[in-house]
Amino acid sequence: MPPAQRRTHDHVRAWSRRRWQAWIVNLISWFANYQGPGHSPSVREELIVDGDVGVILSVLYIALDEMDLGQSYGAPPQGIYFRDLEAELETVEQHVASRGGSIGIAHSPAELDRLIVAGTPALIHAVEGAFHLGDSEAEVRAHVARLAQLGVAYVTIAHLFWRQVATNAPALPFLPDWLYKRVFPEPDEGLTALGRAAVEAMVDRGVLVDLTHMSPRALKETFDLLDRLDPGSGVPLIATHIGCRFGNHEFCFTDETIREVARRGGVMGCNFSKHWMTDGLPGRVRGFDDSVEVLYKHIDRIRDLTGSFDHVAVGSDLDGYIKPALPGLEHMGRMADLQRALRKRYGPADAEKICSANALRALKAGWRGGSAP
């Protein structure tokens, strides 16, 4: 029999496992994640249209693979994770295909340009957590090549838990940093061999490196590695959903890190998580006006440290378990209000950089793209 037909039982078991995992994730999301109207997802087609959003970085992430209760804490990645990731990507492709052309997927900068010209909202595939990529350096390189072929624009190397790829900053809002480090200890290192293989393959294949969630040591080792791989700083770095460190949370970027990302022509997206964005800032945040004032502080900090608005973007992390989001910015439908507020505050040219131009510049400089599956 053809190889695909020999794996019938594997497919059935995988379908069953993904089905109950999806049920669990959806149940948790109802209470702890979704912030759209009626406790619905924050990123939906009608909200994208209402918010005048043209390009959405659509994140692929298998939560129950990262937590994998069948493995001990800190176990290396399992090969099945990448198959789960491909299945999720295929689900997104099928969903968009069923929408009759009202929304599209850009698999390359050229496809992205065509969708923008046509006025069609564009999704771009991304991956959160390099633990999805495999359990050996060879497997990681092969899987990065496959993701590049599928049009994935970036991979966030670290994420919520140590899985022997890269150490991460504490990023569970309900746990203070000191308690997270006690409950989920990590070794004294930054990038492992798997992490280095991922970064090297991504630079080689035209997939952007996302620094979000990295520990200070992982950040430093990534900067050092990129200086060797790309001494001319031709490949921009991105940090898709971060904040500036006004308080003490390690998840938020220090001044030094912000300057280093800018030195490499990178872009940093401001998160909408109330927990991260208000840390260290005085006053209470009750509504939209308070929320945009908080965002202004982060935007101004990046501008002051880098000398321009060229390195700041919108990196909402909506539907990324950031509940509660900053009031008035809970879902995609609120983005039109945010754009108006940014134009009023910074003027049309700099607001355009923040809302889209900087992110599009980074994509076109470092994302090679592939073809539709």
Image: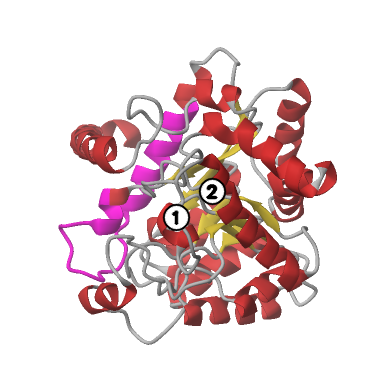
Relative image position of residue 244 (x, y in whole percent): 56, 67
**Residue 298 drawn above or below residue 102:** below
Residue 356 visible (yes or no): no
Query: Badges 1 and 2: C-beta atoms under 8 Å apart?
Result: yes
Displayed quadrant of residue 296: bottom right
**Residue 200 drawn above or below residue 313:** below
Q: How many angstroms separate mark 1 from mark 2 (CA)?
A: 8 Å
Q: Residue 232 or 309: which is nearer the viewer?
A: 309
In this picture, residue 167 sits left or right of residue 97: left
Label 2: which secondary element = helix
Residue 126 visible (yes or no): yes
Residue 284 is labelled as 1
Earlier along the polypeptide chain: callout 1 or callout 2? 1
User: Range of the magenta residues?
Assistant: 64-93
Name the residue tied to disc 2: 290
Relative image position of residue 167 (x, y in whole percent): 40, 74
Relative image position of residue 126 (x, y in whole percent): 53, 47
Q: What residue is shown at x 28% (from left), y 52% (from top)?
A: 65
Q: Residue 254 or 206: which is nearer the viewer?
A: 254
Q: What residue is shown at x 71% (from left), y 49% (from top)?
A: 354
Kind of residue indicated by mark 1: Arg
Relative image position of residue 317 (x, y in whole percent): 48, 48
